[in-house]
Amino acid sequence: QVQLVESGGGLVQAGGSLRLSCAHSGRTFSSATLGWFRQAPGKEREFVAAITWSGDSTNYSDSVKGRFTISRDNAKNTVYLQMNSLKPEDTAVYYCAADMGRKTYIVTSFRVYEYWGQGTQVTVSS
């Protein structure tokens, strides 16, 4: 059974930091692109960041570039999202997801990602 389990969300003041973790299990994700998406109330799910299976390539949305950092530890079956300089507009449910194709490039459309976690709430107060 494939599982992606996010943790690390919470309430933080603007300018603060959080680190999200996503532990995956159930099959080999070493060849998967791992990504983070978010969805705020009344809005569509949007791409945040992703990292290829090798870790050689990352991609970020313009809204988080320079503030968020994605990384992965294949030995620990975990992908991380370090979020700094948080803003109220970062408030959303954050999901991790896996694109199982062994790609050297990153697709930002959520439709490509086959597996999803249950999400973790991030709330940034002003």
Image: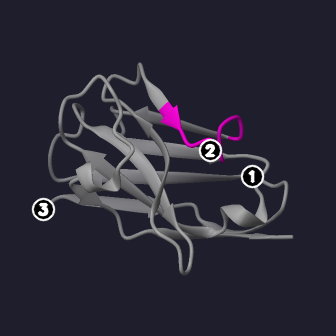
Give percent across and percent down for residue 61.
56, 43
- Please state which of the two labelled residues, at mark 2 or mark 3, is closer to the viewer: 2
**Residue 86 occupies quadrant:** bottom right
Would residue 125 appear left or right of 103 to someone viewing this image? right
Dot 2 corresponds to which residue? Answer: 82
Residue range highlighted in magenta: 59-67
Q: Residue at x 33, y 26 (%)?
A: 105
The residues bearing labels 1 and 3 have C-alpha atoms spaced at a distance of 32 Å
Would residue 33 appear left or right of 22 to someone viewing this image? left
- Can the viewer see residue 101 in this picture? yes
Which dot marks residue 1?
3
Give the amino acid type for the residue marked by disc 1 in the picture. Ser
Q: Earlier in the sequence, mark 1 or mark 3?
A: 3
Helix, strand or loop for disc 1: loop
**Residue 82 occupies quadrant:** top right
Helix, strand or loop for disc 2: strand
Q: Could you tell me if the residues under marks 2 and 1 are in contact, i.e. CB atoms within 8 Å?
A: yes
Give percent across and percent down for residue 125.
81, 72
Badge 3 density bin: few <14, some 14–19, many ≥20, Cα 10 Å: few
Q: Could you tell me if the residues under marks 1 and 3 are in contact, i.e. CB atoms within 8 Å?
A: no
Would residue 114 appear left or right of 86 to someone viewing this image? left
Dot 1 corresponds to which residue? Answer: 17
In this view of the protein, which residue sits in the foreground, 101 or 63? Answer: 63
Give the amino acid type for the residue marked by disc 3 in the picture. Gln
Give percent across and percent down for residue 21.
49, 52
- Please say whether residue 41 is one of the residues in the magenta stretch: no
